């Protein structure tokens, strides 16, 4: 039986190894997905990404903050079915609160220095996803649910 700590460590490794995620938002007529650069907080309770305020994704999030995020380790090879992993994070997205903005901005730019000018542009919004649950899939069909709301302040 896989422990929560083992699953948390696998989740951390996956999020640390990838730089892009797919964010799913809700439009009036159905889901909408977008590719984004992201950064996760150290405790994995939040995921940040940036977008122009003029985008469809930002309008969708402003209207309906429920969101899911997919991060995966695919290499586009047959081996992905046995060795690949993926995680879906489910939560609510908001603009980064002012008291968290500096730390989130530093973390994001450290991870994506090539996006610094875009991140600092006045037309750019930094969005913060408060994750409720992660669904970690490994070995093709092995699924572990990690409920962030049940984590203690120091451990998953």
Image (cartoon, rainbow, N blue to C red):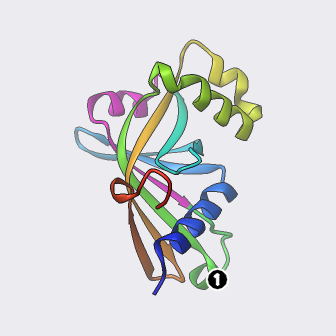
Residue under the point 68% across and 69% down: 75
On the image, the x and y values in percent for residue 144 come to 42, 74
**Outermost residue toward the top?**
122
Specify whether 87 is left or right of 72.
Answer: left
Residue under the point 55% across and 31% down: 50
62 vs 83: above or below: above
Q: Could you say which quadrant of the image residue 18 lies in?
A: bottom right
Decide whether residue 54 is among the magenta residues: yes
Specify whether 89 is left or right of 37.
Answer: left
Residue corresponding to mark 1: 78
**Element at label 1:** loop
Residue in front for this viewpoint, 123 or 153: 153
The magenta-colored residue range is 52-71
- Counting the numbered discs, the total is 1
Decide whether residue 31 is among the magenta residues: no
On the image, the x and y values in percent for residue 33 come to 43, 47
| Residue 52 seen in render | no
Residue in front for this viewpoint, 53 or 85: 85
**Outermost residue toward the left?**
28
Q: Determine crowd level at label 1: few under 14, some 14-19, many 20+ residues with C-alpha closer than 10 A.
A: few
Which quadrant: the N terminus? Answer: bottom left
34 vs 141: above or below: above
On the image, the x and y values in percent for residue 148 come to 39, 56
């Amino acid at each position: 039986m896989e422990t929560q700590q083992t699953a948390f460590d696998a989740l951390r490794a996956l999020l640390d190894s990838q730089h892009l995620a797919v964010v799913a938002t809700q439009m009036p007529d159905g889901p909408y997905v977008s590719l984004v650069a992201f950064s996760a907080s150290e405790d994995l309770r939040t995921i940040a990404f940036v977008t122009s305020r003029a985008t469809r994704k930002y309008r969708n999030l402003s209207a309906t903050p429920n969101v899911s995020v997919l991060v995966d380790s695919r290499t586009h090879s047959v081996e992905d079915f046995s060795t690949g992993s993926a995680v879906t994070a489910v939560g609510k997205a908001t603009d980064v609160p002012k008291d968290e903005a500096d730390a989130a901005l530093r973390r994001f730019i450290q991870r994506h220095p090539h996006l610094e000018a875009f991140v600092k542009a006045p037309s750019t919004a930094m969005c913060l996803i408060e994750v409720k649950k992660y669904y970690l899939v490994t070995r093709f069909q092995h699924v572990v649910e990690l409920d962030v709301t049940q984590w203690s302040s120091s451990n998953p």
